[in-house]
Image: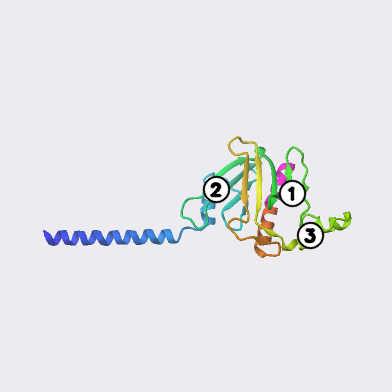
Amino acid sequence: MLIFLMYMFAALGIGLLLAAAVLKLRLSHPSSDLTRLARALSSYQLAFPRRYVTPDQSHMIALDEAGRTLAIGSCNPGRAEHATAQLYTYDTILGSEIVENALTLTKASKTSRITTSAGKPGYGFNRHDAARNTGTPADSSPPDAEEIKELTLRIYLSSADTPVLSIPFLPNLAPSKKTDPEYSQAFTEVQHVHEALLKILSA
């Protein structure tokens, strides 16, 4: 009887050790962030042929033009928890803007149907050119040397629960400069999303 109990407890101990090892392995190798975001969006059973991902893979913006729906998936990169997703119809989208260092670079709204630029490089306006034209002295530092601490896409919705969606494109990173490849990648991606939303607002 004692021998049987000894073998039983030994087998139980080995089983627990194996289970702990498997759990540790799964936690140390979570499924990729893209897979988790795609899985969250798939719960809506829509095609979403156009998808945009933030550089750190914390958000996925998906558009289904046939169903006229916008889905936003979000997760914490590198974490093991599930991603979440929200679905919005095109008619609830009121506007979109790109914000850099708390300044609006460009925005569009359904009410005005006007796209404006706040005079940032990349949108056909250079503040140093403007300074020369007006006679105002420009900053001593070149525009490319400016530190970029924020690059955010804001989507305005006619929703009492979520009137504004703020999607960071440079989150949890040290300040970037306009010449950095990380900034270029982030700016290109946020511009693509904003232009896609502009088409929706102009329809």
Secondary structure of the residue carrying tag 2 is helix
Q: Measured from the top left, where is residue 45 in percent x and y?
A: 54, 45
- The residue under label 2 is 41
Residue at image mark 3: 139
Magenta stretch, residue numbers: 193-203
Instruction: Tell us which disc is closer to us: 2 or 3.
Output: 3
Magenta-colored stretch includes residue 198: yes
**Which amino acid, mark 2?**
Leu
Camera sees residue 190: yes
Label 2 CA crowd tier, 10 Å (few <14, some 14–19, many 20+): many
| Viewer-proximal residue among 110 and 165 | 165
Depth check, mark 1 against mark 3: the one in front is: 3
Q: CA distance from mark 1 to mark 3?
A: 22 Å
Q: Horizontal and vertical percent for residue 97?
A: 70, 47
Q: Is residue 114 left or right of residue 196?
A: right
User: Which residue does the image show at 13% across and 62% down from the upper left?
Assistant: 3
Distance (Cα) linking label 2 and label 3: 45 Å
Q: Kindly identify which residue carries mark 1.
A: 106
Determine the main secondary structure of the stretch shown in magenta: helix
Please tell me which of labels 1 and 3 falls first in the chain.
1
Circle 1: element type? strand
Is residue 140 part of the magenta span, yes or no?
no
Residue 139 spot, x, y in % from top left: 79, 59
Amino acid on which disc 1 is placed: Thr
